[in-house]
Image: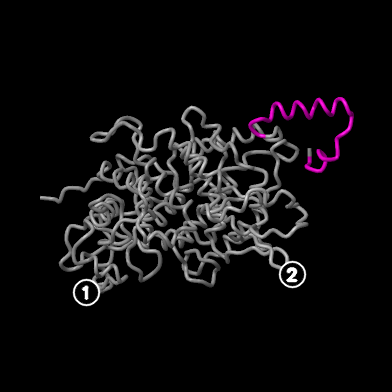
Amino acid sequence: MADAEPSLDVVRHLKYWKMCLQYPLPDLYLSNETNRMALAYFIVSSVTLLTPSGPASGWSPKPLIPPEHRRRLREWVLSHQHSAGGFCGTSSLVPPFGDYDEWDFDQGTRTAEHTGLANLAALLFALQLLALLADDDDPEGAFRGIDRVQTLRWLRQLQRDDGSFGESRLQLPGRGWFIGGGYDMRYCYIATCIRWILRGDVQEGDAAWVEDFNTEKLVQYILNSQTYDGGFAGSSEEEPHAGYAYCAIGALTLLDRPWEGSTAGHASWLHQGIRDKPGLVHWLASRQFVYLLPLGDGDGDGGGAAAESFDRDEDPVNFVLPAALGDLALDENTRHVGFNGRCNKIADTCYCWWVGAALANLGRVDVVQRAASRRFLLERLQHRVGGFGKYPGSPPDVYHAFFGLATLGVMGEPGVKPCDSSLAVPVETVRTIEKARRGLLKTAGRGGAAGSLAQGLVDMGLAVRGTKPGWLAAVGG
């Protein structure tokens, strides 16, 4: 008799995320204090993926994040906005109130001490969180409070001459402005996410116009980073990595993605620009391998003999070659298929996402061993308390638990909302982003929420004086 297929215990996972949301995280997370915005994104996005549209069987219909808590979380997110542009990753990095009142950001006429505290990743997580926490009755107001113009200008300033992006912008004494963060494909991907979320289809001369960054240079930088074996890295001479491949593919997808009602997988840059697309698909497909159970392993519920082995990043069983190389091939009878990020590395939950979502963006999910991959997630990585661990036998953590769910969302798992493979949020949240962007564009040039009154007063003043006052001309009004 064939083994029964595993199932996702939605109630158990929601209990895990409720614990992460309402109680202090374990002390192991203290080293991630500067990434608090990221932790919030993983938790809130996971709750959204698992929260059904109607009452879930066995689970209270009361929302896990009630409206009053959503409002408080939104206020917390907005409190991290940096007046020079971007968002800070944690409250302890937010500059003192009023610190930039005299600062000329375009001319750089005063040295600012805290400009580097905002970073690219925190900005993206903040925007995603605001969309996830939007008021159901006011989706267009999800980005209310965002300084769209300053944010897009700050984003443009993070692009280097070669087209790549850094993480933050610093002013070094005697050396001027410096783009920090190293050369990392993740920043290129994050920049395209922010651009797609905030920019919209505006033309020069429109009230919402903000000068764009150089998309052509970014595309060339990404395309030139494909390696000899088809993968992507920080450059063509480095070791390819599944995370970088996802970021390269995701960036190319988003740069050419329509602003409204779109899904991933139709970008001309993605399908026509990549030098070796068959090699890329082959390299990604090769990140799958048959997962062999270590001797004495239990049921994959977070205990057993495997735990000690994987805590040391060791997996001797899965590095033993079979008697014949033909036995390495995957077939439909394979029980478990894991994913790694590089050649000769062990299976890791997050690479189910980095590889699976990359192939989804390429329109090549047909090369994924879906049933065996699903079993690997649910039988080997799903933990008895909810969530997913990094390796079989590992305790759950919010990073790997989120990407385990997101992968199932791309696979079409019952009980998990569909997940967008290029923006890493539920598809329903992408629709909220589109509405929120429309809300920002409507208020562009009108001073935000109080824009109608403010613009009316300015127009009245111009009619009386006949000329622009100096202060209005100085700010581009």
Question: What's the magenta region?
Answer: 448-476
Give the number of the mark in front: 1 or 2. Answer: 2
Decide which of 426, 176 is in the foreground and name it: 176
Decide which of 212, 477 is in the foreground and name it: 477
Q: Dot 2: what SS?
A: loop
> Residue sitting at 47 percent across and 64 percent down?
231
Q: In the image, 470: left or right of 316?
A: right
> Residue sitting at 46 percent across and 40 percent down?
132
What distance separates the C-alpha of mark 1 from that of mark 2?
64 Å
Q: Main secondary structure of the magenta part?
A: helix
Q: Amino acid at mark 1?
A: Ala
Does the segment drawn in magenta span residue 121? no
Does the segment drawn in magenta span residue 457? yes
- Residue that badge 2 annotates: 174
Percent coordinates x, y for residue 403 in the rendering: 38, 52
Q: Dot 1: what SS?
A: loop
> Residue sitting at 46 percent across and 58 percent down?
33
Q: Vertical placement of 1 versus 432: above or below?
A: below
Which is more N-terminal, label 2 or label 1? Answer: 2
Percent coordinates x, y for residue 288 in the rendering: 34, 61
Quadrant hosting residue 108: bottom right
Residue 323 got which mark?
1
Q: Residues within 10 Å of mark 2 (few under 14, many from 20)?
A: few
Q: In the image, 6: left or right of 247?
A: left
Q: Residue furthest left?
A: 1
